[in-house]
Amino acid sequence: MTAWPYPRWIAHRGAGTLAPENTLAALREGWRRGFRAFECDAKLSADGVPFLLHDDTLERTTDGQGPAEALTWAELSRLDAGGWLAPAWAGEPPAALQAVAAFVRANGCALNIELKPGPGRARATGEAVAALAARWWAGAAVPPLLSSFDADALAAARSAAPQLPRALLLEALADGWLEQAQRLGCAAVVVEHAALGAEAVAHARRAGLRVLAYTVNEPGDARRLLALGVDGLITDAVDRFDPAS
Ligand code: G3P
Ligand code: MG
């Protein structure tokens, strides 16, 4: 089993829903509440700059419109990525992954970068994010964990920076899930929590894989998963769980 330097509790999209997701404000909110590991969603601007956004399009979490990857970073960086949540967050810009790297490194935190490519950009995203992350985390005690639902993005990340740990995201445990994670040289699987049971955890363990669960917001679910021996819990409920537990 690979050494696992990541904290058990990981704040989803920075601070779940308490601050605008995938912004530096969200990471600061998670930090303020004691979280020392964060998950974020990364994709590429039209000019190849990795930045944080969950959706393919801009409408839900910014004041922009249309496909997010059609804009250059200069254009994206002028958007408001906070006002959609509440007026108090207005003016919060989208976060460049490089700025997130600076934040987590300066504060001794860990980062799980979910490769979230827009349509047709899986390989480009995996390659660019992995190559740049290797540079931005050079010499770091804890490397970023690169995860994705997209096998092509993970394969490209592996080619670009084989030394960075990878995790396969799984919404369900379909036939062949373990073999796929192994083929991609993953250190872990990150599974939708309701799909995880004792058998799957044991199966992954025997293959030397770590097991994480998303998105765990109920204390009863967290108790069940910890009893199964999962290595990490990704949560929105940063005000409900004690990340030191
Ligand atoms: O990385 C775990 C989780 O973030 C995957 O789902 O849709 O919230 O990115 P989503
Ligand atoms: Mg995500």
Image (cartoon, grey):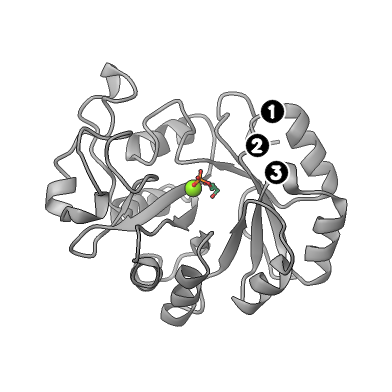
The image shows residue 114 at horizontal and vertical percentages of 47, 55
What amino acid is found at the position of numbered circle 3 in the picture? His
Location of mark 1 (residue): 218
CB atoms of marks 1 and 3 within 8 Å: no
Q: Give the spatial CA distance, label 2 vs label 3.
A: 7 Å
Compare residues 16 and 33 and report the one nearer the observer.
Answer: 16
Query: Dot 1, how many residues are within 10 Å of its Cα: few (below 14), some (14-19), or many (20+)?
Result: few
Circle 3 — which element? Answer: helix
Q: Which mark is residue 193?
A: 3
Q: Which mark is residue 164?
A: none
What amino acid is found at the position of numbered circle 1 in the picture? Glu
On screen, residue 156 above or below 213: below
Image point 29% across, 46% down: which residue?
Answer: 95
Query: Dot 3, how many residues are within 10 Å of its Cα: few (below 14), some (14-19), or many (20+)?
Result: many
Compare residues 135 and 53 and report the one nearer the observer.
Answer: 53
CB atoms of marks 2 and 3 within 8 Å: yes
Compare residues 122 and 203 and report the one nearer the observer.
Answer: 122
Q: Give the spatial CA distance, label 1 vs label 3.
A: 11 Å
On screen, residue 90 above or below 169: above
Circle 2 — which element? Answer: loop
Name the image quarter holding the N terminus.
bottom right
Location of mark 2 (residue): 216
Q: Nearer the viewer, mark 1 or mark 3?
A: 3
CB atoms of marks 1 and 2 within 8 Å: yes
Q: Earlier in the sequence, mark 1 or mark 3?
A: 3
